[in-house]
């Protein structure tokens, strides 16, 4: 690939050059996030798409009618190839996944053609990108809300929970800029590279942690767990260790997830009476782009209506870690009530929790815009 700049592309753009732009931008994004192997995979598929290589899979991708960026189309293909490698079914891919020299175009083109029946189903749904490292962002936001005077006992509602890994945040240990949070013997421990001042050092507790997903993943099912691992970029070995620890934790006590779309889940959850002295929180990470526009509108309307009813004893908050596709990084934003809706950005973060930049002063936020 000779062009090293992101091509302008709006999240929900479709048609024209959007498929090519999505693959190009995804490869650059992977390289910027220390994932050169995944970038090689995406680049090879991009080149095959640009040529005249035949096949139902390539033709279906070329003719994609949805928004390839919002649909994470490149990662659907990459996930399918990674799954073949993880199952040990395609030795030809091994050199690439070891980071060794290979004729990427020839190898991947041959595998795509020969294993098309196995790979086509990976186009049917968005990637499941559950990552425990993102939970550090939720903790920062909860500490900040507690510092603002909201009750530090949280009723957490997560949309797009996937396997529910971030619904187990009460079982993890965190060192965030020198501030320690969570059980001493947490099933996972996080100490991301810290940039900026430490977060507030406040005691927090959890009233409940519940979530939804349109296709929840059962971590105790080996086949489903393998599918989730296929979406982990192979360069990020620490994430595989985290996944194994999360599987062990879920085996001991499953996270509370229901099969439901985001709008229905939020509307129903907000209709349930809220206990006094608790802060009700909607949270999600790298999910919003996968929520259909009509559901986004319903979630926003339900939160605005609930915010209008919020009181000091029963406040409401909305925590999001989502990609800013203009500047190509991930923003930690918080909206909260009562007293009128307040929107702030607390920082920016690595997509998988490797580092966090906590702002000394929150910035005004327009998310979602």
Image (spheres, helix red, strand yellow):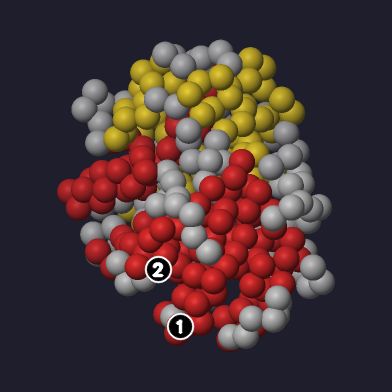
Q: Position of residue 6 (x, y in %)?
A: 75, 49
Q: Position of residue 225 (x, y in %)?
A: 31, 60
Secondary structure at badge 1 equals helix
Q: Residue at x 76, y 51 (%)?
A: 3
Q: Answer left or right for 233 relative to 249.
A: right
Local packing at callout 1 (Cα closer than 10 Å; few below 14, some 14-19, many 20+) is few
Q: Answer left or right for 354 relative to 341.
A: left
Secondary structure at badge 2 equals helix
Vertical side of 308 occupied by 25: above or below: below
The answer to whether residue 139 shows anywhere in this view is yes
Vertical side of 1 occupied by 313: above or below: above
Q: CA distance from mark 1 to mark 2?
A: 12 Å
Local packing at callout 2 (Cα closer than 10 Å; few below 14, some 14-19, many 20+) is some
Q: Residue at x 57, y 33 (%)?
A: 349
- Residue at the disc numbered 1: 114
Vertical side of 296 occupied by 158: above or below: above
Residue toward you, 6 or 127: 6
Label 1 vs label 2, nearer the camera: 2
Q: Earlier in the sequence, mark 1 or mark 2?
A: 2
Q: Position of residue 326 (x, y in %)?
A: 76, 44
Q: Are the residues flagged by discs 1 and 2 in contact, CB closer than 8 Å?
A: no
Q: Quadrant of residue 176?
A: top left
Q: Quadrant of residue 55?
A: bottom right
Q: Position of residue 56 (x, y in %)?
A: 58, 86
Residue toward you, 134 or 259: 134
- Residue at the disc numbered 2: 92
Q: Residue at x 63, y 47 (%)?
A: 29
């Amino acid at each position: 690939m000779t062009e090293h700049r992101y091509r302008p592309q709006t999240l929900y753009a479709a048609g024209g050059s959007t498929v090519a732009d999505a693959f190009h931008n995804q490869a650059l994004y992977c390289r910027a996030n220390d994932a050169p192997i995944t970038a090689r995979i995406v680049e090879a598929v991009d080149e095959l798409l640009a040529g005249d290589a035949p096949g139902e899979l390539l033709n279906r991708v070329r003719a994609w009618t949805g928004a390839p960026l919002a649909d994470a189309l490149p990662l659907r293909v990459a996930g399918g190839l990674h799954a073949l490698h993880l199952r040990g079914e395609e030795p030809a891919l091994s050199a690439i996944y070891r980071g060794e020299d290979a004729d990427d175009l020839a190898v991947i083109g041959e595998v795509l053609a020969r294993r098309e029946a196995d790979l086509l189903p990976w186009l049917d749904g968005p990637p499941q990108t559950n990552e425990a490292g993102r939970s550090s962002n939720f903790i920062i936001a909860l500490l900040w809300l507690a510092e603002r005077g909201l009750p530090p006992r949280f009723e957490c509602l997560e949309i797009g929970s996937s396997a529910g890994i971030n619904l187990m945040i009460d079982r993890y240990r965190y060192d965030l800029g020198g501030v320690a949070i969570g059980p001493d013997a947490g099933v996972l421990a996080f100490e991301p590279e810290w940039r900026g001042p430490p977060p507030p050092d406040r005691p927090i507790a959890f009233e409940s942690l519940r979530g939804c997903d349109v296709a929840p993943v059962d971590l105790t099912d080996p086949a489903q767990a393998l599918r989730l691992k296929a979406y982990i970029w192979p360069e990020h070995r620490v994430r595989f260790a985290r996944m194994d620890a999360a599987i062990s934790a879920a085996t001991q006590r499953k996270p509370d997830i229901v099969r439901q779309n985001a709008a229905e889940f939020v509307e129903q959850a907000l209709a349930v009476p809220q206990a006094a002295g608790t802060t009700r929180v909607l949270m999600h990470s790298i999910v919003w782009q996968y929520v259909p526009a009509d559901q986004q509108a319903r979630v926003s309307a339900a939160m605005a209506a609930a915010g209008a009813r919020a009181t000091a004893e029963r406040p409401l908050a909305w925590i999001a870690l989502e990609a800013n596709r203009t500047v190509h990084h991930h923003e930690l934003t918080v909206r909260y009530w009562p007293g009128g809706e307040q929107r702030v950005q607390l920082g920016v973060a690595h997509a998988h929790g490797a580092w966090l930049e906590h702002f000394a002063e929150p910035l005004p936020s327009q998310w979602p815009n």
